[in-house]
Image (cartoon, rainbow, N blue to C red):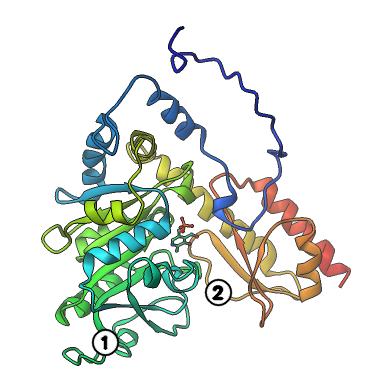
Amino acid sequence: MTDPTSTTESRTDAVRRHDPSVRGFASDNYAGVHPEILAAIALANGGHQVAYGEDDYTAHLQDVFRKHFGDKAEAYPVFNGTGANVTALQALLPRWGAVIAADSAHINVDEGGAPEKMGGIKLLTVPTPDGKLTPELIDQQAWGWGDEHRAQPLVVSITQSTELGTLYTADEIRDIVDHAHQHGMLVHVDGSRLGNAAASLGLPLRAFTTDVGVDVLSFGGTKNGLLFGECVVVLNPEQVRNIKYLRKTSMQLASKMRFVSVQFEALLTGDLWLRNAGHANAMARRLETAVREIDGVTIVRPVQANAVFAILPREVSERLQKRYRFYFWNEHTGEVRWMCAFDTTEADIDAFAAAIVEEMGRA
Ligand SMILES: Cc1ncc(COP(=O)(O)O)c(C=O)c1O
């Protein structure tokens, strides 16, 4: 028999079960895989490579990440964002430690309690107007060190871009890091959409992470065109140790890691990450521009990355949802979230905006 992985034919018994021309605004996770990423996966196929990260692709990945995040950066590929966050946070904390985060943080609202359940981590949350922590907001929870009755606040976690589609400037992150470090706390960034932030800020990735003193990062790939995969990126190896053991016990160690690593190589070696993220952001801005003048539609948050948040009559949103997938962000206020992805087209935006006008007309 010939080597089955050497064939370039795409013969399959699987049947296409969806319409690939249908796109919605529910999540950047709904998008498919960028063709350059699929090509990279095919390239890494064939033959045998040592499993569990001892492969040539993962070895090279270290250089790829160092180019973006500096010479001390260490990249640990994982399966998903929740796993990246839980692995990274465990590495920062002793068993009695706690993490200060915005109450809207993904680790608090969208990870099913995984930090608490899998990591044994106490989250100390703070309400924010825009998904962003500040030194003053951090201080609402940064107290009680030495008090054995209080979980010890030893880490601050922020999200860039935030769950509410907003951005921290590099200076804002520097202020948070300086404040946290002064109080003996380390800083984690949930960078599930870090590429979107860089594209929007017009800054290199390291300018608002490594260069402002962030200790560890969850770096996103899935939302920016990967099939799957995120990386825990250690920026301060003196303080953040033992990720490799924690990754395994957190069930995030991929045996066929070469296929995660090669995706990041394809994403980060050239400008694919920036093209994808910049495009998603541009589509969100286009959507904002198209709908902001529609009577009865209010854009309720600054559009700084690839998300648009709006309030419109509930019955209009419900009718629209029959035509396009998207979520209510806040059932109580009727706020909806429209996400753009690397594959959202201008025609998608224009058709969606026209559908909003049409449904508003029937209100
Ligand atoms: C801010 C943020 N962090 C992390 C994640 C990653 O989550 P998952 O575990 O679904 O990959 C997401 C996904 O929606 C997210 O929005």
From this view, report whether residue 240 is shown above or below residue 302.
Answer: above
**Residue position marked by numbered label 1 in the rendering:** 142
Label 2: how many Cα within 10 Å (few below 14, some 14–19, many 20+): some
Q: Residue at x 33, y 72 (%)?
A: 120
- Mark 1 falls on what kind of element? loop
Query: At which x and y percent is residue 92?
Result: 22, 67
Task: Please identify, in this view, whether the residue under mark 1 or under mark 2 is nearer the observer.
Answer: 1
Q: Earlier in the sequence, mark 1 or mark 2?
A: 1
Question: In the displayed structure, does residue 186 sit left or right of residue 86?
Answer: left
Label 1: how many Cα within 10 Å (few below 14, some 14–19, many 20+): many
Question: In the displayed structure, does residue 308 sit left or right of residue 115?
Answer: right
Name the mark on residue 40: none
Real-space Cα distance between discs 1 and 2? 28 Å
Q: Residue at x 29, y 53 (%)?
A: 247
| Total numbered circles | 2
The amino acid type of the residue labelled 1 equals: Ala
From this view, report whether residue 114 is shown above or below residue 41.
Answer: below
Q: Residue at x 26, y 45 (%)?
A: 65
Name the mark on residue 301: 2
**Which of 13 and 165 lies nearest the eye of the viewer?**
13
From this view, report whether residue 317 is shown above or below residue 77.
Answer: below
Query: At which x and y percent is residue 34?
Result: 51, 37
**Which of 266 and 204 lies nearest the eye of the viewer?**
266
On-image quarter of the C terminus:
bottom right
The amino acid type of the residue labelled 2 equals: Arg
Query: At which x and y percent is residue 297?
Result: 71, 73
